[in-house]
Image (tube, rainbow, N blue to C red):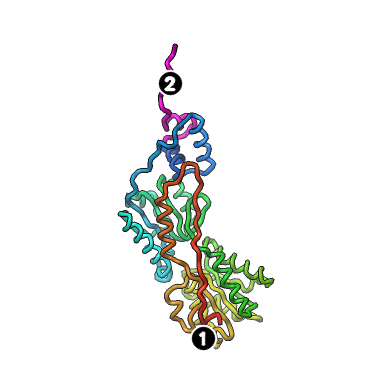
Amino acid sequence: MCAPDTRQTTIRDVAKRAGVSVGTVSRALRGQTGLTEQRRQQILTVAQQVGYDLNRLRPGRFRRVLFLLHRQHATLQANPFYAPVLHGVEELCRSRGLALSYSSVGPGDGVGDLARLHEADGLLCVGFFEPEWLGELRQISRRLVLIDHFHEDFPSVNSDNLGGAKAAVLHLIHRGRRRIAFVSGPPQHYSIAQRRQGYLDALEQAGLPALPEYQVVRNPPEDELATPAAVQRLLALPNPPDAIFAYNDATAMIAMKVCQELGLSVPGDIAVAGFDDLAAAAQTSPSLTSVAVDKEALGREGMRLLLRQPHPGSGPIHKVIPVSLILRESSG
């Protein structure tokens, strides 16, 4: 009579049955990045079939965090937004006894090399990242969270860009404006695309047409003259706008200055509203109506999400931080 097999099923058994490496199985069971959700579910199914005890996995000690900011955001213009995000991360790291390092990154920089250099246990990827970057991040077997960006395969934290933009444009409509223009940044950025959609949703709700000539993109975004040129194109239309909603405060403040230089009164002739509620928004003349984003909360919530050990088999968590519309003089 043969003795029963009491050997405990190991991760190697799962890897052998699934036909993948032990490292791939480990990433799947721990909910880490580096493989597709379909592949993860296949491995989890195999683990259940061979009787692997998922409760045996224990997270290692989490010590070091790397804050990655795309180089295009690491500018003086972007800094008023992203510096408070970093501060929110820093506060939480300090309270948890975690080491925090920072690096700006751009095309050609190896994310994996940076993670190893900083000995990072987790990554906070902040702002827009190109698709090829996201593909590289998928291959890194470390926890990561996107902040102010979105991809269905990665955990993310964003402000309510769509709802905030819709509220701002509806406010302009309620103030009697009917020819509302939108000055946009690069449309491939998730937050900007969401703000544009909020603009369109507000027009549709009010029964107003979304005219293409009222939607301009400041291009190229790094050119300081791009915003004035875009606003001047709007004001040169046969039937120019009576309001401008800009995708961020920096653009809104430039738009307001261009209008004033051309002899238009704000908000008498044209109303202006922005997004982000930078500190300078309350200091302009007239003061700027804007959508307030809790930037430090973006950082804190991103950090909390990074520390949260994902349950094996669960999908990525996507959090949205509420915003609020701050009414000032520029919208009347």
What number is the disc on residue 261? 1
Asked if the residue at tag 1 contacts the one at tag 2, i.e. Cβ–Cβ closer than 8 Å, the answer is no
Residue 235 locus on image (x, y percent)? 59, 81
Label 2 amino acid? Asp
Can residue 254 be seen here? The reply is no
Viewport quadrant of the C terminus: bottom right
Residue plotted at (63% across, 73% down): 213
Residue plotted at (41% across, 52% down): 306
Look at the numbered disc 1 and give the secondary structure of its residue: helix
Viewport quadrant of the N terminus: top left
Closer to the camera, 58 or 211? Answer: 58
Which residues make up the magenta segment? 1-22
Which of the 4 image quadrants contains residue 201?
A: bottom right
Residue 230 locus on image (x, y percent)? 55, 75
Q: Residue furthest top?
A: 1
Residue hosting label 2:
5
Can residue 187 be seen here? The reply is yes
Q: Residues within 10 Å of mark 2 (few under 14, many from 20)?
A: few
What number is the disc on residue 316? none
Which of the 4 image quadrants contains residue 272?
A: bottom right
Which of the 4 image quadrants contains residue 174?
A: bottom right
| Mark 2 → mark 1, Cα distance in angstroms | 85 Å
Does the magenta segment cover residue 207?
A: no
Label 1 amino acid? Glu
Q: Residues within 10 Å of mark 1 (few under 14, many from 20)?
A: few
Residue plotted at (41% across, 60% down): 299
Residue 91 locus on image (x, y percent)? 34, 61
Closer to the camera, 61 or 135? Answer: 61
Does the magenta segment cover residue 21?
A: yes
